[in-house]
Amino acid sequence: MRDHPEGGTAGGTTAPAGAPATGAPAARTLRAELLIVLALSLGASAVSALISFAGSLTRPGHLKDQAATLNASHAPGRPWLDLAWQVFGIATALVPVVLVLHLLAREGTGARGIGFDLRRPGSDLGRGAALAAAVGGTGLAFYLAVQAAGGNLTVVPSALPDVWWRIPVLVASAVQNAVLEEVVVVGYLLRRLGQLGWTPAAALAASAVLRGSYHLYQGVGGLLGNMAMGVLFVLLYRRWGRVGPLVAAHALIDIVAFTGYVLLAGKVSWLPTA
């Protein structure tokens, strides 16, 4: 049986679409909580991305001649200090996820309420791998087209030094991105918006626009491509009732993008480099 992650109660009874779950906090409390969570995480990233994009637009030259680096060195020439900064950054980026899971646990649902658990690891991984294969190839083709047309910066997935920990850090960074985005922007956001009475269509639009907005630093392609991905992920979440497959798919997409760039940059003509 499919889970009902939006509007479900702690005991498994499903509330009507858009109705607050039984025992849920008051609407004012939920709105404040949601704003705080977003201000501490991807809402702040969206504002940062907007400012960054404004800077790129007002800088001399074309967007495609500028670079957006995703995983940069924090201590060039000092690999152990750099590693410490990388681990610190990945760990602290997951704090909002811990906060969200704590808030969900307080209302009686917890991670299981949004399908972020290990009940169905094989199913989650299988669905995630299939989704990653479909979305990853399409996303790459879209990025290359928009970048060539001048609507996107050149995305540099990794500028880390060639040391032993580069690939493990890139994999960990990919997993962190996946967990943060899917738990907050899909599982948590849709649940709270449903409790606040938002219609399914409005909640889907909010999730997709938020996902696209914090990728705006990459350019128009980053905005539109991730909005489209956001719509698909919300629809699949509502069908499957779990963020697990979405986390798996997102992690696999980023792992291939990050490590693939390291292996292919400068060796193939079709891959833009800074």
Image (tube, rainbow, N blue to C red):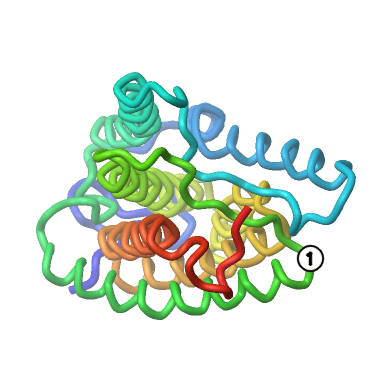
Position of 232 relative to 17 (above/below): below
Judge whether residue 159 can be spotted in this image. yes
The answer to whether 166 appears left or right of 30 in the picture is left
Tell me the quarter of the picture where residue 95 sits.
top left
Give the labeled residue for mark 1.
150
| Depth check, front residue: 215 or 27 | 215
| Depth check, front residue: 179 or 238 | 179
Q: Residue at x 77, y 64 (%)?
A: 151
Residue 5, percent from left and from top: 32, 57
Q: How many marks?
A: 1
| Depth check, front residue: 159 or 235 | 159
For mark 1, give the secondary structure.
loop
The answer to whether 55 appears left or right of 255 in the picture is right
The answer to whether 128 appears left or right of 213 in the picture is left
Q: Residue at x 83, y 56 (%)?
A: 62
Give amino acid for label 1. Gly
Q: Residue at x 46, y 32 (%)?
A: 73
Q: Quadrant of the N terminus?
A: bottom left
Q: Dot 1 surroundings within 10 Å: few (below 14), some, or many (20 or more)?
A: some
Judge whether residue 92 can be spotted in this image. no
Position of 225 relative to 18 (above/below): below
Q: Residue at x 32, y 63 (%)?
A: 252
Residue 101, percent from left and from top: 28, 36
Residue 173, percent from left and from top: 35, 43
Tell me the quarter of the picture where residue 164 sits.
top left
Residue 142, percent from left and from top: 61, 75
